[in-house]
Image (spheres, rainbow, N blue to C red):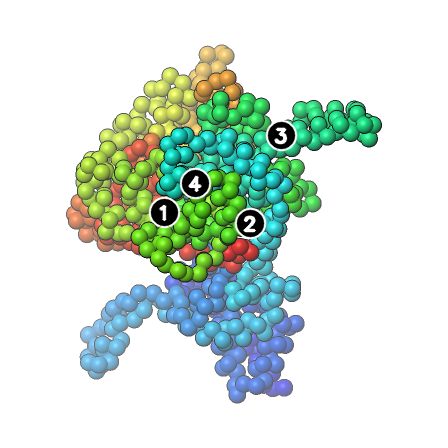
Amino acid sequence: MRKRSMVDNSMNKSVYSHFNQVKEVIQGVEAIDYFFAKEMLSALTAPANRQLLTEVADFASDTRSDINRQHNLYHVFLALSASLRAGHSCLPLSEIADQHWGKGFATTKKYSQQDSESLSQEKAQEHTQELSHAGFIFAPLPQLQAMLSELNLQASDQQLLVLQDDKLYLRRYYQFEHDLGQAINARLLQKCQYDDDSITQCIGRLFPNDSAQVKAQETESIEIDWQKIAVANAINKNFSVIAGGPGTGKTYTVTKLLAALVMLEQTGLEQSGLEQSRLAKAGIVHAEEAQQKQQGTPALNIALVAPTGKAAQRLSESIVNATSGFKGLIDDKVLAEIPTQAQTLHRLLGVLPNSPNFRHHEDNRLSYDIVLIDEVSMVDLPLMTRVFRALKESAKVILLGDADQLPSVAAGSVLADIAPRPHGGFSLENEQYLTQVCQLSPDQLSGHFLANKHGKQNAKQVNVGKPVSIDYLTFLLKSRRFDGQGGIGLIANSVIKGDVKRSWQLLSDSLTQETVGQLTLAQGELSSWLAPLVKQYYQPIESCSTVSEAFALLAQFRVLCATRQGDFGVEQLNEVIKSYLGKNNAPYQQNQHALYHGQPIMINENDYRLGLYNGDIGIIWRVVDQEGKVHLMACFEDVSSERKNLDDSEPTQPAIRQILPSRLPQFESVYAMTIHKTQGSEFSHVAMVISATESEQQSSQQGQQQRGSKLLSRELLYTGITRAKKQLTIAANQRVWQQGVTGQVKRHSGLDLDQR
């Protein structure tokens, strides 16, 4: 009994008495990690659970094993909190087992002359080097598993944490992953309602073959049209993913997909109406009922959705442009049923003010037959799960996105999880279906994937087992914007492949024939190259005759940064740019007196009452009221006012909303933005400021200590690069660029689908 008492006392002792103690030991730890671990240790080793630990401790020779157990558990919870902050949905135990976690860098300890003389030479060498942070060494994997198993952290239990397949979850994130996986797998099992012959006819109308294609097909040398494959592949599935880089035509492809689904549904309704008429004539059903079946209700209820207002606006514009280009190819009756107004995910679900919940959920489902979500890489795990929970089980879900871009800021990497690279190929059944409806030559698809894996020369000679198939996924491989010859496309491909040498060569030799006109490596001081760009793009904004013209000019150019703070962060560069414009005479304050005509601003928090959301872009504009008085108003493009007009070749301009600056939620100037914030946006010219230029680094003694460089990754660079449509200017030195290209974002996740 005395031994048990000693164990209980040791259990009640906190591993660290306050946060500063943790901070001195573990590098990078935050206060939230300290309190999270403290609460978890307290909750999971409470009297009801502590009995399990003390019973195990009875077999120990002393209390040291229990103290070690407590320390390991606390640091596991500490690591879990840090993992969640980094965007992981779980913590694999194998990632921390036997690891010296949180240790700092080696520093030289300084001794006084007296102390140095009292130490032997050998001891002096030992004691002059120490770690800035001691860190913590975790127990081996079997011990960690045994410790956590004692806490009964199973999915069926009601503990705060879940241990599943050696992955440690906060229960809510486990539930998100579990529910999302189940919802997607349920759709993958649903059978197609259209027959292959009808799909073949539909695909033939949407993708007519010209004589050259037919001739090439006869010689089995026709290039695979991946847009055509994507449409056919998504038609017969209730869940599909179409992934591709910029300029590959994702929205063009999905517009044809929506047209195909409407065509097939209209054909089905017409046939159903004819059958109803026949039955009415035979007296089996009432004539009124038959007439109602044939009257003009939309064939399908379709929702177009994106994570942000800007992404929704771009999706709307792309759909409008696509439908306008399809006139003559696709029946107007079909085009009329394709929606052109996209909305945000939050608006789709129905935001409840001052509540984390939404209006639509598993008990109040949405009525849409088809939900198309664009820019999926930006959607975090909790939000995506809530979308699927709110959909009816028969709803078809189509996801669009670039799997190479940055994952969401919040937890999870849904698109990367469900769209792995490289594609392993299709199942035999799906391959046969696609070959038939797309009229491909035999083994054309399997030959492509085999060649892609083993090299085109030896594709036919290699006899290997078929990799795991992913039928719901199609990659669009051909970029119409970047054909592989221009600098932007070349450097984007090099970066995402992790090719440091090639990407830096493209930058440093940016005046070569293959990159000239698109790619520029900034040289010299910031003022020598940025000030002319500011004068060219930003200065004329205040001289525009209308605020709509100002928005159009603002959309041509943007400065992108990796971080918010630091010498090359958003906050500093916004002030620098304002100084170039002569607008920073007074300190920046969020009130009307500090604002000026033509100032671009970005909203930093949601205001559901005003309908303004984090990331919305506005312009401060001088407005004359009815009495002739001049006021500064915050103007925003009202995307919801856009309507499609099939008789016009161009979409209508969005209306302008005017809001008093004093009513705005938190905002800031937006000459410069973080790369994260620009996801879903595109600009004609992008200036990406990563670090000091080569010449600045050489002239600066602090050039080796670039702030924010730890955040760099190839995904971040790729995302920034692909925001540029025509021109790209990059400010960076070789050391920092190498660090970014070699770095990679890896999110731990347990999301797994049946077909993987």
How many C-alpha atoms fall within 10 Å of the one at disc 2: few (<14), some, or many (≥20)?
some
Image x and y of residue 555, in percent: 38, 29
Q: Nearer the viewer, mark 2 or mark 4?
A: 4
What amino acid type is highlighted by mark number 3? Gln
What amino acid type is highlighted by mark number 2? Pro
Considering only order in the chain, which callout, 4 or 3, is on the residue closer to the N terminus? 4
How many C-alpha atoms fall within 10 Å of the one at disc 3: few (<14), some, or many (≥20)?
some
What amino acid type is highlighted by mark number 4? Trp
Residue topped by disc 2: 382
Residue at point 50%, 33% (across, down): 204
C-alpha separation, residue under disc 4 versus residue under disc 1: 27 Å
Please state which of residues 125 and 414 is positioned toward the viewer in this rendering: 414
Q: Would you say the residues marked 3 and 2 are in contact, meaning their CB atoms lie under 8 Å apart?
A: no
C-alpha separation, residue under disc 3 versus residue under disc 1: 44 Å
Residue at point 38%, 35% (across, down): 215
Give me the disc on residue 506.
Answer: none
Considering only order in the chain, which callout, 4 or 2, is on the residue closer to the N terminus? 4
Above or below, 48 relative to 491 = below
Residue at point 44%, 38% (across, down): 227
Q: Secondary structure at mark 1?
A: helix
Residue topped by disc 1: 716
Image x and y of residue 694, in percent: 19, 46
